[in-house]
Image (cartoon, rainbow, N blue to C red):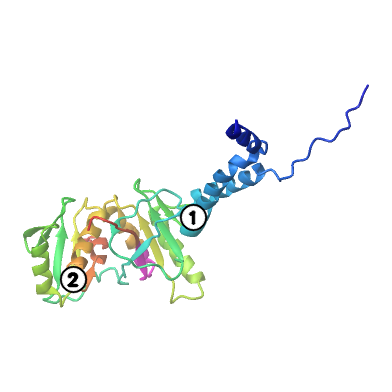
Amino acid sequence: MKIGAKYAARNTSSDDNMVPLINVVFLMLVFFMVAGQIQKADPIAVIPPQSVNDNRAETDPNIEIVLGADNSLYVDDVLFVMDDVQAYLEKQFAATVDKDTFWVQIKADGAISLEKLRPVFNQVRLAGLTKVSLATQLERGNE
Amino acid sequence: MPLNLSQPKRKNAISLTPLIDVVFILLLFFMLTSTFVPWRLVDTPLSVAADQQKPLEEKANLILTLKHNDDQVWVNDQVIRFSDQSRFHALIEEHNEGVFIIQADAGVTLQTLMHLADRLKLNGAKTVSIANAFAMPETK
């Protein structure tokens, strides 16, 4: 039969039927390379509060404080006790050359209550730092 | 013993399998490392001295207090639901020259605070201060 012979001829080169697969995989690869952003992972998973606010950071934060839903506190990826934060912040601030742009980013889980967050802000304030930003994620849809 | 020296028949095309292996590894890498939700930032400038918790007391300032995570806010001993657009609108029209200061009782989550700040902003509030919600309660 003609058709059978045609398919038999195609199958002699076994890689031919992989070409569509490669096409799809390449497309996915290009999508993830272009659309995604590679950034450092947080030490613990944090789901930031949703907000309509759309401000983005212009510079990288000098200090990054992560407060997880389980109240674990990480400063620059190191597990910290609350009382040690002030000393660390002061040390980092003293070691920075460009003091005007020094800012602290606080990434806190949306589900933690505010009284857990207050000591963190208090430590930052005690360290004499005033530029603090709270991380949120953009709320989409339902508004 | 007859030695079979005949060369295996060469394929005329390069095998695609190693290519696919590499492409799959690249694909996995990019799928796992890329994030599609960039973080946004809310500035919460702090006053330096710990006792400057009350910003300039002006008549126009409006203090909103969150007591629970029930999408309600207390203003001047009245409860306003977050969904009550007209009340919010009236409130903001009335006080838009001042600062909307949000305070929170124990147990209120960060997400609730952000919802209220969003609500105020969406209804046209010019200045919303959330820093007071993070201030330590006054030591007595």
Left or right, A133 with reference to B56: right
The one nearer the camera, B92 or B9, is B9
Left or right, A34 with reference to B83: right
Residue under the point 26% across and 54% down: B111
Is B52 covered by the magenta stretch? Answer: no
Q: Chain of mark 1?
A: A
How busy is the neighbourhood of tag 2: few (under 14 within 10 Å), some, or many (20 plus)? some
The magenta region covers A124-134
Q: Which mark is residue B124?
A: 2
Residue depth check, mark 2 versus mark 1: number of the one nearer the observer: 1
Q: Amino acid at mark 2?
A: Gly
Q: Amino acid at mark 1?
A: Phe
Left or right, A130 with reference to A36: left
The one nearer the camera, A134 or B135, is A134
Residue denoted by label 1:
A31
Q: In the image, residue B64 lies at what x, y percent?
A: 15, 63
Residue under the point 92% across and 24% down: B2
Q: CA distance from mark 2 to mark 1?
A: 38 Å
